[in-house]
């Protein structure tokens, strides 16, 4: 029953929705539609009750509201004009309780039914620009003042007994309070859903600690790290192989591989920095400094090479060109920070980044090539083979090692 009700509410919430709607507009539309439907049935019930008590004119007002409200929902579903739908709903809920109170004889004899008009400014705050809500609140205040002024000229009695007047007092107070609670509860629930989804997307772009700092301060201060281990990967003969594939096949292949890399480095406490074409860059020891970053990164590099060996065999068995990968690792100081205003990116700078890139380009497919600086930090954990000093572009000769296995 609960799931069926949820499906009905979700379908109602889609009335008038457009694919081009922002999350905020989509939330406003869904909430207003979901709230409008119960009002239609409640108003009709209300009208029937007043009719049974002999107040035909007062009964006609909520019945009229039901008809016009339902018509505005149908019109909104056809025209998708949210501004018209929003105004009609806010105007009806503002004016009709006021008219009903006058027809019943004022505040007390009308069981303070004008309280329902208070939903109009609240609705304006939820469904419209926040700057427009005070206008609707002012309109509500004006109606209350008018009600006070004309009170002496209203009818002295209506067809309701004191017990019935008290009953409607309770109904109105409970009804208005319940509707306000439901509106705020639904709105907050949806807002929290969208906020959690936005935060999840933000965490896909920025490390958790950096995202928290950005939300708290509005900016992220650049930070110097004295020792960070940087890893670069690159595919051998990627350009030649990609010429034989369709664009869709290239993107699908890179997506499959980089997703696997993401999972691997995540297991080893390594932070993804960025991808550049077919190159993948990550680092250990940031945004929170630690003493195991070199071991973490080399472990991740070894796992990536093992994954690529399995993937290579799979492609060969399918008669496809194999993707082979070079991996380079170096340890050194970097500066890390967030760049960009519209699209944030957590990045790192420093000579360590450049040398890590040279480790990759000076390496061999299927191997993990590390610098002497990294070797000194992992020599007791991995079996490494010295390559001697290798000429690196723009860096001169650098002592390098191939990581063969875990000790």
Image (cartoon, rainbow, N blue to C red):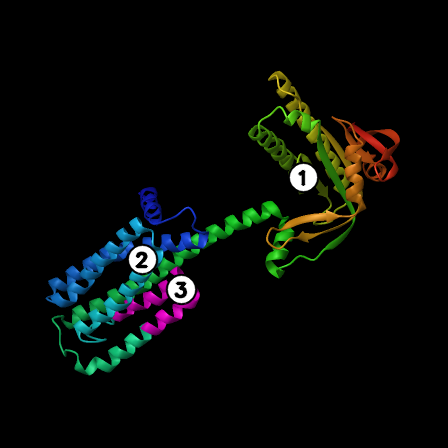
Q: In which quadrant is the N terminus drawn?
A: top left
Percent position of residue 396, x then y: 88, 38
Question: Which image quadrant for residue 278?
Answer: top right
Residue 125, label in figure: 3
Q: Secondary structure at mark 2?
A: helix
Give the alpha-carbon distance from disc 2 to disc 3, as whole Å.
15 Å
Dot 2 surroundings within 10 Å: few (below 14), some, or many (20 or more)? many
Question: Which image quadrant for residue 368?
Answer: top right
Residue that numbered label 2 is attached to:
85
Percent position of residue 316, x then y: 64, 18
The range drawn in magenta is 114-139
Residue that numbered label 1 is attached to:
276
Question: Reading the chain from its start, which is encountered first: label 2 or label 3?
Answer: 2
User: Vertical placement of 227 versus 358: above or below?
Assistant: below
Percent position of residue 283, x then y: 72, 42
Q: Identify the residue at image location x=55%, y=50%.
A: 199
Residue 11 visible to the viewer: yes
Please tell me whether residue 264 belongs to the stretch shown in magenta. Answer: no
């Amino acid at each position: 029953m609960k799931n069926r009700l949820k499906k009905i509410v979700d379908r109602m919430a889609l009335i008038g929705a457009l694919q081009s709607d922002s999350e905020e507009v989509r939330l406003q539309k869904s909430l207003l539609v979901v709230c409008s439907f119960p009002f239609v049935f409640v108003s009709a019930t209300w009208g029937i009750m007043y009719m049974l008590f002999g107040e035909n004119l007062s009964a006609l007002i909520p019945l009229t509201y039901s008809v016009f409200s339902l018509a505005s929902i149908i019109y909104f579903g056809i025209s998708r004009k949210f501004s018209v739908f929003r105004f009609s709903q806010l105007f009806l809920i503002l004016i009709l309780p006021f008219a009903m109170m006058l027809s019943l004889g004022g505040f007390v004899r009308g069981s303070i039914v004008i309280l329902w008009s208070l939903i109009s400014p609240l609705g304006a705050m939820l469904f419209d620009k926040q700057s427009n809500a005070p206008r609707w609140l002012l309109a509500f205040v004006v109606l209350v003042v008018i009600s006070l002024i004309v009170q002496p000229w209203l009818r002295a009695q209506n067809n309701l007994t004191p017990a019935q007047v008290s009953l409607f007092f309770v109904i109105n107070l409970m009804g208005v309070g319940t509707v306000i609670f439901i509106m705020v509860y639904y709105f907050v629930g949806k807002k929290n859903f969208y906020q959690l989804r936005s935060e999840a997307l933000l965490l896909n772009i920025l490390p958790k600690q950096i995202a928290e700092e950005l939300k708290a301060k509005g900016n992220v201060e650049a930070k110097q790290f004295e020792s960070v281990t940087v890893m670069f990967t690159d595919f051998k003969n990627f350009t030649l192989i990609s010429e034989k594939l369709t664009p869709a096949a290239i993107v699908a292949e890179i997506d499959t591989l980089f997703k696997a890399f993401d999972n691997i480095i995540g297991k080893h406490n390594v932070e993804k920095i960025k991808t550049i074409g077919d190159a993948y860059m990550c680092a250990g020891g940031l945004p929170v400094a630690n003493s195991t970053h070199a071991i973490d990164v080399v472990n991740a590099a070894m796992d990536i090479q093992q994954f690529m060996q399995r993937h290579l065999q799979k492609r060969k068995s399918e008669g496809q060109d194999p993707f082979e990968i070079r991996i380079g690792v170096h340890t050194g100081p970097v500066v890390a920070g967030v760049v960009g205003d519209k699209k944030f990116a957590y990045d790192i700078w420093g000579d360590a980044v450049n040398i890590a890139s040279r480790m990759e380009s000076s390496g061999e497919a299927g191997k993990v090539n590390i610098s002497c600086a990294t070797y000194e930090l992992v020599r007791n954990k991995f079996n490494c083979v010295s390559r001697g000093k290798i000429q690196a572009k723009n860096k001169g000769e650098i002592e390098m090692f191939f990581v063969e296995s875990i000790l």
